[in-house]
Every structure is written in structure tokens, then in C-alpha cells.
Image (cartoon, helix red, strand yellow):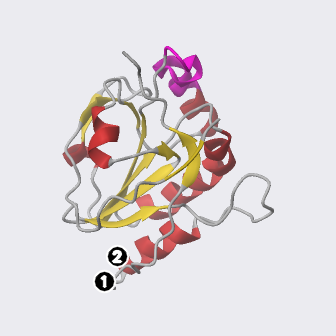
Amino acid sequence: MSLTSSAMLKLGTKAPHFELPDSISRSVYSLEQLKGEKGTVIMFISNHCPYVKHVNEEIVRLANDYRILGFGFVAISSNDVKAYPLDHPEEMFKAARQLNYPFPYLYDETQDVARAYQATCTPDFFVFDEALQLVYRGQLDDSRPKNGIPTSGRSIREALDALMNNRAVSRLQKPSMGCSIKWRTY
């Protein structure tokens, strides 16, 4: 495993468009179909990464808490499945069912979406406002495997609370840390 930090896409960036297949429903979804009325959280995750496994329960709680308030949530896996078969769409389906993901879990086979978002690690989080302008990118919270800090989703929750209350999202944002996205080699 290669520990990697977020690239920290420039705040204010418009969310890049995508149309990707959902490993759960087998439907193809676009960003426009998944965006929330108040904002949208896009998470780049994977099945095999211990950093994602560490936060899985909290991202489910987070989505369940905020979807009812008008926020859209979507997870995307962009890893090379030939090198990492645990990240294959069939395995994504199994993981999503087992963990009760309340959001689509999309497969970015070409890795073009990860490149467009400058996603570099799993997990990597992006929060967009109602106009799909980037207001937050980086970590879920300060918890990491084995650091003793419980997961809380605090960093994302603070950003979503600010959006919900028409306040500015703090520009003091910490990068996420996790497994590098497994880029295909040709």
C-alpha cells in the first residue's frame, strides 16, 4: 500500500460531468441525476484499502444523516481491477450490499472521472454546493487506522452544516490520506 494525500482540487472548481454505471443497480447515472438540492458529496473509495475500510461505517452514517436534508451522495471506484480484483464491479456490489451503502457506488473503468476530479487516493472527498461549485475537498475527519481517534465525519459535517445554514465553508481544509488510486499501466 502506498500512502497518498489528496491533490486538493482548487476551490470554486465546477464539478466535472460524468456518466458512470452503478455497481448496485446496474443503471448508468450522471452527476445531474445524483446531485442534491443543497449540495453534493462525491467520494472516491475502493474495497481493498484499509483507510476506506476504517471509515466505511461513518460514510454510511454521514450519508444517512444528510441525504434527508437535501444532500446528494455518490461513491466512485476508479482502481485498475486487473491489478486489484477486489475492486471489480461484482465485488463493489457485494461490498455495497454488505455495508448498506445508501448511495450509488459507481465504477470509473476508464479512470477519466478520477483524473477530472484530480482524485489521488482512497478515500478522497469532494463537497459541492447547490450550483456544483467545489467548497470542500480533503479528509473525512482526523481519524486514521490505528491513531486512536474515533471516526466522526467532522470535517465533512462542518462543510455540510455551513452549506445548510448559508454560511461560508472554512477554507482551512486538510487533505485526505489513504491508498493511492491504482492507475492502469499500458
Q: Is residue 121 left or right of residue 26?
A: right
| Amino acid type shown at disc 1 | Asn
Give the residue drawn at x 50%, y 62%: 175
Residue 166 circle label: 1
Q: Which residues are magenta?
A: 82-94
Residue 29 in the image: state x and y as whole percent.
26, 35
Gap in Å between the C-alphas at discs 2 and 1? 5 Å
The answer to which quarter of the image holds residue 106 is top left
Give the residue drawn at x 35%, y 23%: 109
Q: Is residue 63 magenta?
A: no
User: Residue 76: in sight, yes or no?
Assistant: yes
User: Residue 68: in sight, yes or no?
Assistant: no
Residue 166 in the image: state x and y as whole percent.
30, 83
Q: Is residue 143 left or right of residue 120?
A: right
The answer to which quarter of the image holds residue 47 is top right
Q: Are marks 2 and 1 in contact (CB under 8 Å)?
A: yes
Crowding at mark 1 (Cα within 10 Å: few <14, some 14-19, many 20+): few
Residue 163 circle label: 2
Give the residue drawn at x 58%, y 40%: 100
| Amino acid type shown at disc 2 | Leu
Q: Which of 12/41 is in front?
A: 12
